[in-house]
Image: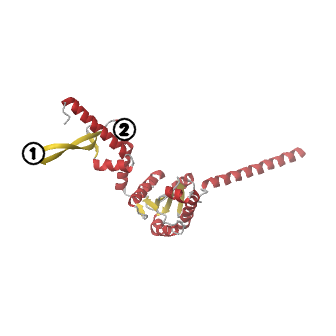
Amino acid sequence: MSNYTDRTDEYEKLESENRRLKEELEAAKLKTVIDADTGLLTPPAFLKAAEKKLRDAAPGEYVLACLEIGYFTELSERFGYNEADKLISYIGEATRHFTGEGEECIACRLGIKRFYRLLSSKFVMENADEAFDLYLKRFGLPFNIVCYKGAYVINNTGLPIRQYIGYAVSAMRDAKKSGDSRVHLFSREQHECDLRRQYLVDNIDSALLNREFVPVFQPQIYIGKNGIRPFRAEVLCRWIKDGMTVADPDEFISVFEDSGQIGKLDQYMTHEACRFVREYIDETGNDD
């Protein structure tokens, strides 16, 4: 009888310990679901919850929205990282307050300055945007905080959640380019333009390495008393690969400028122009 009682007590102790460990594990999981800085979901928890919501959603019922804090790096450097951290927490609070995180909305912060929300389409368009901006003005910095916002109305719920995020980011970048703090809806045309520009950016280095940028010399004509004669040439640039034009100068020059790589093209074209002149002199003996 004593052995049976001892075994029963030992079993109950083990069960109690198992329950305690399980409760601690569940508490740890709960902590990792919530981002400590914003009070919003962590990115993995957001992706999982968003996929669950969209699984049975009707087309157009939800919107995936992206928000990016403008000039965040400059703000951090000017006012200090503590102030920047407060702003992150403040935006998390504003997101929970004005977009009703829960049944109507789930949200997370991904990266340093970017927030994502999955909201009912009617709610985000009619309520959240204006109230959110007014709330930000109360933060207390000596200038207005600018947030760029993009949104994608989910009409096809069968796509991966990360694809919707990409569409929302594309719309946000469109808002950022225009300097507009209002929500910009995703545009298929704008997205294709962004993809095109990204393709050009990704291929700049290989194009330079493979000498796909071809100099074209446009003569400058002098008209005087002694007649007409060419006196110099302007070097133009064409992007040619396998005998085909990759992009017109009006398109790829702006890509170089926006990506901060215009210096590479300037250096390359100067080298190519000098190489052409050297070869011309060597072949003709004419250095006029």
Q: Amino acid at mark 1?
A: Gly
Q: Which mark is residue 206?
A: 2
| Left or right placement of residue 166 versus residue 26 in this view | left
Looking at the picture, does residue 210 appear above or below residue 107?
above
Across and down, in percent, residue 182 comes to 43, 65
Looking at the picture, does residue 245 appear above or below residue 16?
above
Q: Amino acid at mark 2?
A: Ser
Q: Nearer the viewer, residue 153 or 214?
A: 214
Q: What residue lies at 25% left-to-right and 38% top-to-bottom?
A: 243
Across and down, in percent, residue 279 comes to 24, 32
- Dot 1 corresponds to which residue? 227
Looking at the picture, does residue 285 appear above or below residue 92?
above
User: Could you tell me which secondary element the residue under label 1 belongs to?
Assistant: strand
Across and down, in percent, residue 185 comes to 40, 61
Q: Nearer the viewer, residue 83 or 129?
A: 83
Q: Earlier in the sequence, mark 1 or mark 2?
A: 2
| Left or right placement of residue 101 versus residue 247 in this view | right
